[in-house]
Amino acid sequence: MKRIFLIGYMGAGKTTVGKDLAKRMGLSFIDLDCYIEARYHKIVGQIFAEKGEEAFRDIERRMLHEVAMFEDVLISTGGGAPCFFDNMEFMNETGTTVYLKVSVEELAKRLEVCKSTRPVLKGRSGDELIAFIAESLEKRTPYYMKASVVFDAEVMLTETDVHEISEALEKIL
């Protein structure tokens, strides 16, 4: 029975790598944010706007506990999930955690192209975006570094890169 949690900052490649790795390892794939959206029939941004961050983080914790009961599963968490309540400790106790580590500069490049789909990034670009990511990542890194596996996911430009990351992770896991 395998249970793997992919963690890391938004744009680190958790969903992209997660889908590929789950397929390679014969595991079910769950994107925690998508799971929440399906259960609540609202996108995460709407839940945040309507209920606030505190209520969202409670929902996220409860849904994390729910999906953590599944077997042979790879779960891609939201970027903040490991940083609230005892979520990181819980994930480490119930499965293997993998932190996809990416530099601030690379995250900024990746997020610049998709910031319209991420409400927290709207209106931020260039140096402001880099400063925002750097500040957020500095707060989250102590939680991320508690992962069972810290994996450098800096190079992820092509589908081949994704496959190579998945292959390397499969050997580790």
Image: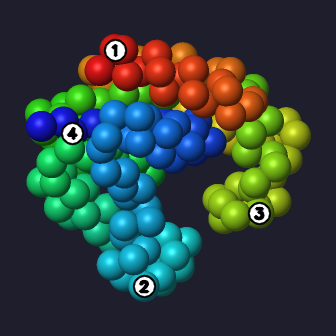
Residue that lies at the very extreme toward the right in this rendered image: 126
Residue topped by disc 4:
3
Q: CA distance from mark 2 to mark 1?
A: 36 Å
Residue topped by disc 3:
116
First in sequence: mark 3 vs mark 2: 2
**Numbered label tally:** 4
Q: CA distance from mark 4 to mark 2?
A: 26 Å
Between 10 and 85, which is closer to the camera in this rendering?
10
First in sequence: mark 1 vs mark 4: 4
- Circles 4 and 2, Cβ within 8 Å, touching? The answer is no
Q: Secondary structure at mark 2?
A: loop
Between 160 and 103, which is closer to the camera in this rendering?
160
Amino acid type, callout 2: His
- Residue 84, which numbered label? none
Q: Which dot, 1 or 3, sits closer to the camera?
A: 1
Q: Identify the residue at horizontal 70%, vertical 64% (top origin).
A: 117
Q: CA distance from mark 1 to mark 3?
A: 35 Å
Amino acid type, callout 4: Arg
Between 57 and 38, which is closer to the camera in this rendering?
38
Q: Which dot, 4 or 2, sits closer to the camera?
A: 4
First in sequence: mark 4 vs mark 2: 4
